[in-house]
Amino acid sequence: MDLGQLARLRTPAGSAALAAATAVAGGDPLAAAAALRSAGLPADLAAAALTQAELRRRAVGKFGPGAADLFFTRAGLEQATRQVVARRRAERVRASGVRALADLGCGIGADALAAARAGIRVYGVEADPLTAATATANAEATGLAERFTVTQGDATTFDLNQVDGVFCDPARRASGRRIFNPNAYSPPWDFVLSLTERVPRTVVKVAPGLDHALIPPDAEAEWVSVNGDLVEAALWCGEFATVARRATVLREEPPTATTGPVGPATRVHELTGSRVAEAPVGPVRRYVYDPDPAVVRAHLVAELAGALDATLADPTIAYLYADTPTPTPFARCLEITDVLPFSLKRLRALLRERRVGRVEIRKRGSALEPEKLRRDLRLTGDQPASLVLTRVDGAPTVLICRPATS
């Protein structure tokens, strides 16, 4: 999609083309294109509408049913914040007292729209002309154009005197490739860090794999997971910072008679800590906990161990062991039935003896590839089991497990 195609899609004729494309999207793309052309749509408009309809279909996972009203670019959708995460962040920003927010590198507007819905006046800045135009289209499509305006230009030149908060999501891709050097971000990392000195309330979206050495010493670093998937991290700086580390675990639950059909309810769980605590080390016990990736990446395994009265079996591996199961949103708990030094032959024989034919495989500290191991086991039974590949006292070990019951 280019600027001209975006403009056409926003006309009455474009809306009709989008409706027609939505009706045929999701199947054979050649057949869909032929159907639109046979309906009299010009080839270029049909192609743009089909692309947009497909992007909207993919966007439902991030934006929910509201994706049907938004405009997307491929890169913009890939990099956009999930709606549930953006909404959670906007609520925190608004609760801190921010009334006017600069969104530097606003992309297609996912975070800015959430902030505008929360009642914040948002000034978006985006370098790419098409992405900036898409963000503007989304502000208008959602009825938020009075609260969210977009300037196409250089984020480093924006006048920060008109805002009391900053959100910055530096671009971490160039020509479709991921950038690992923060100094090559756009805007660059040194500018991003300077924001924390110029605006007392600054939050920066970063990659979950950010080197902890790059975290400013006075910042709060937060890692966020959604339904068990680690999706992003953020640095809360200045007046925003309240703790050293935070793991935020979001669980989306299906609509119920109480929540209605508008979308899943979201449960929010937060674990915080100092980043300096250490978990005790002990033997393998009856239950093993696999911490949520947000907890692991935030280096809060020790804090979780304290809450569960659990220990590590290896100081370098984030599996926790306890004598009793304790319900927690921060980890998956399994009951251990067998602890074996890893041997493919012995493991295969034991699983066949127990008629195990389906295995869930988890691993930390193991070089084994789960799918290859699954094939090598050649299981044929009808019973399930969970395998945990790890190390104990430095030795490769496999734990045979089943779901824990409290």
Image: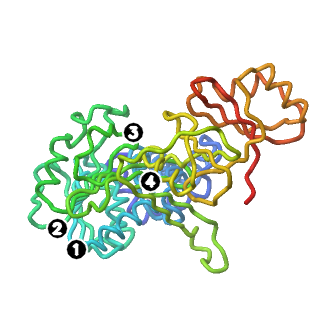
As helix, strand or loop, the secondary structure at mark 4 comes to strand
Three-letter residue code for mark 2: Asp
Three-letter residue code for mark 4: Val
Residue under numbered circle 3: 209
* Residue pictured at 57% horizontal, 59% vertical: 329
Disc 2 residue crowd, few under 14, some 14–19, many 20+, Cα 10 Å: some
Q: CA distance from mark 3 to mark 1?
A: 31 Å
**Residue located farthest toward the bottom when viewing the structure as drawn:** 258
The mark closer to the camera, 2 or 4, is 4
Q: Which label sits on residue 164?
A: 2
Q: Which label sits on residue 99?
A: 1
Q: Which label sits on residue 224?
A: 4
The mark closer to the camera, 3 or 1, is 3
Task: From the viewer's perspective, tell me whether residue 218 is left or right of residue 372.
Answer: left
Quadrant of residue 395 within the rendered picture? top right
**Considering only order in the chain, which callout, 4 or 3, is on the residue closer to the N terminus?**
3
Task: From the viewer's perspective, tell me whether residue 208 is left or right of residue 184.
Answer: right
How many callouts does the rendering have?
A: 4
